[in-house]
Image (tube, helix red, strand yellow):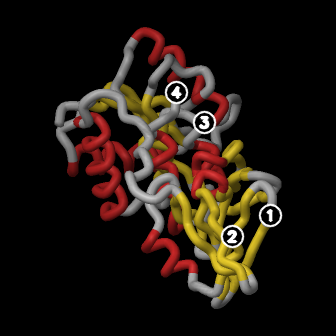
Amino acid sequence: MNLTCIIIDDEPDAIDLVELLIKQSTSWTLKAKCFDALEALAFLKKNPVDFIFLDINMPKLTGMELATLLPPRTKIVFTTAYSEYAVDSYSFHTIDYLLKPITLKRFLASVKKIEQHFSKPGPEHLPKAEQGPQFVFVKSGTAIRKILLKDILYFEGEKDYIRLATGQEQMLIYRRLKDMEEQLTSPFIRVHNSYIINYEQLKKIEDNHIYIGDKLIPVSEKFRERFMEVINKNKF
């Protein structure tokens, strides 16, 4: 696929590595190599590209700060040694998040993701909940309760139990989280070994955590990519 890009990084060795990987693995055109954010900003104002490789930890202006100043809809592939910025990075038009040192295997996976992104026809939206029952029956003590799916905030795994939380109450279910995950469809998604959330109920995402109801839920690296793909489909 013929795509155009630039590399923005204050480390010459890091730029050389990404440039080499591009030449070896793609047919993309590398338009420029910029060693600081201000140089890159000036270049992009006159030379639009399909996407940029952007380091986060840079002097003068960090990659995150630069991302807020980029032309609208500029696509970003972050390159950084710091995993803690991963979720925050997806508040921009982020395609991927590459952790340094970047391996050939990981770069090839990113190439596939980038080219798939640009081959998608038109804007996408969050997947709609599948048709079918919009409620579950939950055994609570001696009673069987009917709970509307839209009212559920999250499920939290606790050994052989699951804690089901709505905005009004919590209850324990004698089931494993993995078994529950196999039965649930959109808008429920696994974000951690211990949590499945209803993404229609989340308030915000910040510092690798989800704010939902009065709960702060971590997003683990294992589930982060799939979760952010879903979120990005309905991001403006």
Question: Label 2, on which residue?
Answer: 164
Could you classify mark 4 by the number of other residues whose Cα lies within 10 Å: few (under 14), some (14-19), or many (20 or more)?
Answer: few
- Which of the 4 image quadrants contains residue 158? bottom right
Q: Earlier in the sequence, mark 4 or mark 3?
A: 3
Please report contact status of discs 4 and 3: CB closer than 8 Å, yes or no.
no
Which of these two is toward me, 178 or 66?
A: 178
Amino acid type at image mark 2: Leu
Question: Disc 4 to disc 3, how far (Cα)?
Answer: 20 Å
- Please give left or right for residue 123 compared with residue 172 in the image: left
Find residue 73 and name its label.
Answer: none
Q: Which residue is mark 1?
A: 169
Residue sitting at x 32%, y 48%: 113
Residue where numbered disc 3 is placed: 63
Q: Residues within 10 Å of mark 2 (few under 14, many from 20)?
A: some
Q: Nearer the viewer, mark 3 or mark 2?
A: 2
Q: Earlier in the sequence, mark 1 or mark 4?
A: 1
Label 3 sits on a secondary structure element that is helix
Residue 84 horizontal/vertical position (percent): 66, 56
Disc on the earlier residue, 3 or 1 = 3
Task: State the CA–CA distance, disc 1 to disc 4.
Answer: 33 Å
Q: Amino acid at mark 3?
A: Gly
Secondary structure beneath dot 1 equals loop
Q: Quadrant of residue 194?
A: bottom right
Q: Going from the N terminus, do you reach mark 3 or mark 2 first?
A: 3
Please state which amino acid type lies under the numbered disc 1: Glu
